[in-house]
Amino acid sequence: MPSVVDMIVSVLAPYVGRTQADTFVRATALGLGKTSDNLGAQDMPMIENNVRRLLKPVAPAATIDGIVTEIERSIA
């Protein structure tokens, strides 16, 4: 089974590129005082907030909602 990091990166990469998606995951984890390997479903509120902030300038709200839902499903 893929890790939470892999799941999030795979969802975000088509929109921001793999490197930016990986950086996003690491930065989100650090913001929570964790490593990216320790992210889990319990961190979804922070992940969602950061996804919305990252994508707001480049994607419509409906697309962002879909991305958030896809991440949520993949890490639940």
Image (spheres, rainbow, N blue to C red):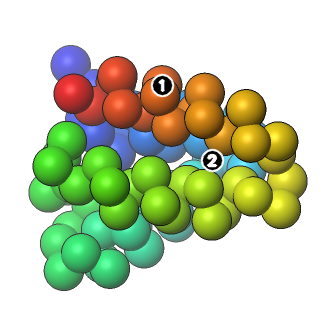
SS of the residue at dot 2?
Answer: helix
Which quadrant of the figure contains the C terminus? top left
> Of label 1 and label 2, which has the lower sequence position?
2
Q: Is residue 53 above or below residue 7?
A: below
Query: Residue at 48% of width from left, 25% of height from top?
Result: 70
Residue 17 placement, left or right of 47: right
Determine whether the residue tagged by mark 1 lies in a helix, strand or loop: helix
Q: Amino acid at mark 1?
A: Glu
The quarter holding residue 25 reads bottom left
Front residue of this view, candidates 73 and 4: 73
Front label number (1 vs 2): 1
Residue named by callout 2? 18
The picture quadrant where one finds residue 27 is bottom left
- Residue 62: x and y in percent read 73, 32
Examine the rendering and report whether any part of residue 10 can be seen: no
Q: CB atoms at circles 1 and 2 under 8 Å apart?
A: no
Q: Amino acid at mark 2?
A: Arg
Badge 1: how crowded within 10 Å, few (<14), some, or many (20+)?
A: some
Rendered image: mark on residue 70:
1
In the displayed structure image, the side of residue 39 where residue 61 appears, left or right: right
Query: Which residue is pictured at 32% across the width and 55% down the height?
Result: 45
Image position of 14 (left or right of 60)? left
The residue nearer to you, when weighing 69 against 75, is 69
The quarter of the image holding the N terminus is top left
- In x, y percent, where is residue 4? 28, 39
Answer above or below: position of 12 versus 39.
above
Q: Indicate the position of residue 52 as horizontal and vertical percent values.
A: 60, 56
Q: Which mark is residue 22?
A: none
Pointer 2: residues within 10 angstroms few (<14), some, or many (20+)? some
Does 5 sit left or right of 32 as displayed? right
Rounded to the nearest whole Å, what is the CA distance between mark 1 and mark 2? 17 Å
